[in-house]
Each structure stands twice: as structure tokens, then as C-alpha cells.
Image: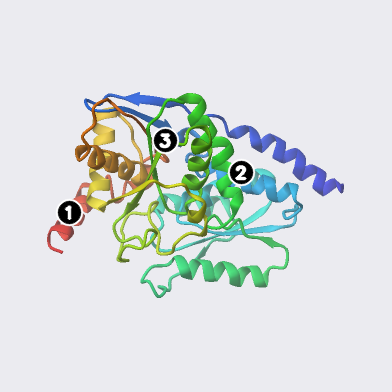
Amino acid sequence: MTALAQGLVERLAVVEKIICPTPVIQLTNNHIDLFTKLEYLNGIGSIKDRPALWTLKRAIERGEIESQTTIIESSSGNFACAIATLAKMLEINFIPVIDPNISPLYESWLRSQCDRVIKVENHDDTGGFLKSRLCKVQQLKSEISDSYWPNQYGNPDCMEAHYHLTGEEIWQSISSIDYVFLGVSSAGTIAGVSQRLKEHNANIRIVAVDVEGSVIFRHSLYKRWISGLGSSIIPPLLKHALIDEVVLVSEVETIAGCHELLEKYGLFVGGSSGSAYSAIKQYFAKLNQRTRPRVLFLCCDRGNAYLNNIFNRRWVEWRVNATDNA
């Protein structure tokens, strides 16, 4: 092993220590035993810390990433921020590919951590930017000979991170569980967690949560204003997920869920958390159960990146009025 490679391995051993188990807490509820796993307590600040670290670790072990490698990835926020921090700790170059919908907080963070940030401005054929970002990633890969693309939508390493870490932590924390509600975007979380939990107990029901305007479960595609949930493509990792049911929520319900989590439980969390919480309320309002089911969802990130929309009173009023007038 060269001195450069040895140095990278040594830095990796230090970096790995930032990922530790996150707590599961119980929330007061009149109808169900409700639990949430606080994934925003990961070192860099979101559930994406896990696949970011796992993916880089596996790539380094396989020799796909070396000290001179440039990492290139498309991300709307959390995954890019996690990669940026880890890459800096590992002393590896990283180029994030973002778009105008990114939170100003995330963009500022990436520009502070990365020498080069690519922001695509052209809409793709869906009216969004995801396909444009992915196209730019491929262009950069062709231009930079020693490059690595983590590919959070299709890399099995992302799924395995949640299989070995998130899913197993859930089981160790609360093995007696009836339902798990999981938001879907890149699908790595729901694929890994569902496989792990179903291995332990096939009767656990996995409920996928998607947002209106997303095509993941072949619903109609239209403009979405809140990042972090849904997608304009069907992520390849979705085929590995063991899903029992799907609940679709509106962005207005996402907003309401985030505000209720803050006002009722003191949880300042982002859009995917609010969506999952709203899906749970919607689901059990229609279900007649004889016993109190035990239900878990994830608080994936903090609400800081949503101060310009979900937690902005004027924006919320505009979004609600836009829905009413649609």
C-alpha cells in the first residue's frame, strides 16, 4: 500500500467514528403508541450521513476512491452536505451538482466546504432539475479521468448502510413494532430498513410515504416546492424495498405536520419528517384498530433548511392559498 493510500485509510478510521446510534423516543398520542428515531442527531445533521459514509468507506476499501480521486454527486441538500464534510475530513476533492431549488443554507454550506460547486439552471423534460443534474454529473465524469460518483439513487451501498445501521438500530431499540412509516426519495432508506426489519419480523408493516407531484409510485408529476421528499424519477433502489402500503400526502399536510411536531413535541424537523407524521395521522384516522399499534417514523433532518418555506409564515400563507385556488 502506498503512503497516500495508507493515509486515506487512517483518516477513514477517524471519520467512521462520527456515526453513532441515534435515539428512539416515544411521543404522546391518544390512539397509538408513537415512536420516532432522531436521525438529525447524526454528526453532520441528517439521516444521509449514514449512506454518505458507508458509500465512501466501501469505495475506498474497493480501491475506487484514492487520495487523488474527485467525488461528483447530484444532491438537493443533505447527501451533498454529508459528502462534502466527509470528503474534507478525508482530504478528497468533491464537486456537488445542485440546482436553484436548493435551500440557501445548504448552498452556503457547500460553497464553504467545496472548491467547486456546479449549479444547473436548465429545466429537464419534467419541468424540474433532477435529470439535468444527473446529466451534468455524467458530463463531469467524462471530463475528470479519476472520478467517483456515489449515485445515491442506484448504489446498493446506500441501501446497505440503512440495512446494517438504521434498520438494525431500530430493531435493537424497539423490537416490538407494528408499523414503520418511511418517506421515499432516493429509496435507499426504505430499501435497507424494510429488508432488515422484515428479516427480524415479517409481520412488521412498511408504509411508504410519498408527496403529491412525485412520480415514484407512478402518480402524476407536477411542481413540488418542498425538497427532501418525492422525486421526478423512479429511483432504481426502490425495487429492493419491501413495501406493504403507500400513503400520499400533500405539501400542505407536510407543512402542517412539521408545525405540529414543533408545537406539540418540540421537534424542529424538516419536510420528510412532517410528511411521515401527517401520513400516520391520515392512516390511523381511517383505521379501526382494537388494540393500540406501535408505530415508528424517522425525524430525518432539522428544520433549519426549511426556514425560507415551511417555517416562513408568508410563504406558508402563499402555498396554502395556491392550493385553495388550484
Closest to the camera, between mark 3 and mark 2, is 3
Nearer to me, 97 or 182: 182
Q: Residues within 10 Å of mark 3 (few under 14, many from 20)?
A: many
Point out the image quarter for the C terminus. Answer: bottom left
Residue identifier under label 2: 53
Q: Amino acid at mark 1?
A: Val
Q: Amino acid at mark 3?
A: Ile
Q: Position of residue 72 (x, y in %)?
A: 60, 60
Say which residue appears at 79% left-offset and 43% top-offset.
7
Nearer to me, 200 or 115: 200
Give residue 204's mark. Answer: 3
- Left of 145 or right of it: where is 5? right
Residue identifier under label 1: 320
Q: Earlier in the sequence, mark 1 or mark 3?
A: 3
Nearer to me, 201 or 183: 201
Residue 21 falls in image quadrant? top right
> Is disc 1 placed on a helix, strand or loop?
helix
Q: Position of residue 88 (x, y in %)?
A: 64, 47
Q: Amino acid at mark 2?
A: Leu
Q: Earlier in the sequence, mark 2 or mark 1?
A: 2
- Left of 86 or right of it: where is 257? left
Q: Residues within 10 Å of mark 1 (few under 14, many from 20)?
A: some
- Left of 121 or right of it: where is 72? right
> Is disc 2 placed on a helix, strand or loop?
helix
Say which residue appears at 28% left-offset and 28% top-offset.
265
Q: CA distance from mark 1 to mark 3?
A: 35 Å
Q: How is the image coloured?
A: rainbow
State whether residue 85 appears in this view: no
